[in-house]
Amino acid sequence: MAFGKSFILSLVTVIAVGFFGFLLSMIIGEQIDQIVDNLSDLSDLSIALFGPVITFPYAIVFGLTNSLAEPITAGIIVQSIFYIVACLLAAVVAGKLGENKQEAFGSWFLTAMICAGVALTLTLIEGVYESLLTWTIVSIIIAGIVNGFLYGAVALLLNKAEFY
């Protein structure tokens, strides 16, 4: 029962905090009029809901440090912070609610895989250019695995159970 509770609450946490960060970044970035347009497109909806899990952690940091391509705005900074906070907070929830370390790690890893799978499904339903299709599939799956292992380690370390 603890595994299910840990999984469901970490899934809800990552989606809710990520979506709140998306909305806040759009408001701060003065793109309020584009919120409805972005949420009507399935691939943008998948980024709004599952962006923290389908984005590589190094891409978040690189996006903040690379100001040559485009200037960094307050909206980008807020979205990057919420991408990291959403996954960390969900990993903490999974770690604290899991009965043992395996459940803590497994519930976060399952959360990451479910989020990546749903985001991939929404992106494929919407359709992407054929030249980008393979790269999109591989990128979303690998980002889910990387985030699953990275933040799964956080959940594992924050669990109160001891190895015996």
Image (cartoon, rainbow, N blue to C red):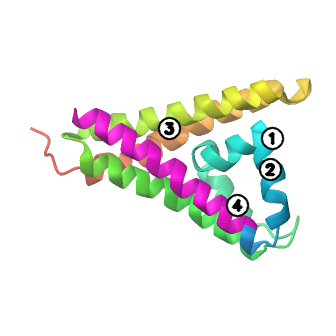
Return the mark for residue 112. 3
User: Residue 130, relative to residue 91: is it above or below?
Assistant: above
* Residue 138 shows in the view: no
Q: Which mark is residue 62?
A: 4
Secondary structure of the magenta portion, mostly?
helix
Q: Closer to the N terminus: mark 1 or mark 3?
A: 1
Residue at (46% x, 37% y) in the render: 111
User: Residue 101: image x %, image y %?
Assistant: 24, 40
Which residue matches tag 2? 38
Mark 1 burial class by Cα count in 10 Å: few <14, some 14-19, many 20+: few
Query: What is the distance, in whole Å, between disc 1 and disc 3 at their CAs?
Result: 22 Å
Which circle, 2 or 3, is nearer the viewer?
2
Where residue 10 appears, as percent x and y from the top left, is 40, 46
Identify the residue shown where x is 70% and y is 61%.
62
Nearer the observer, disc 1 or disc 4? Answer: 1
Disc nearer the start of the sequence (2/3): 2
Q: Which residues are magenta?
A: 1-26
From the viewer's side, name the closer residue of 123 and 57: 123
- Residue 83: numbered disc: none
Q: Nearer the viewer, mark 1 or mark 3?
A: 1
Among the two numbered marks 2 and 4 on one chain, the one whose residue lies closer to the N terminus: 2
User: Which element is circle 4 on?
Assistant: helix
| Tag 1 secondary structure | loop
Q: Position of residue 12 (x, y in %)?
A: 45, 46
Asked if residue 10 lies in the magenta stretch, the reply is yes
Which numbered dot is residue 41? Answer: 1
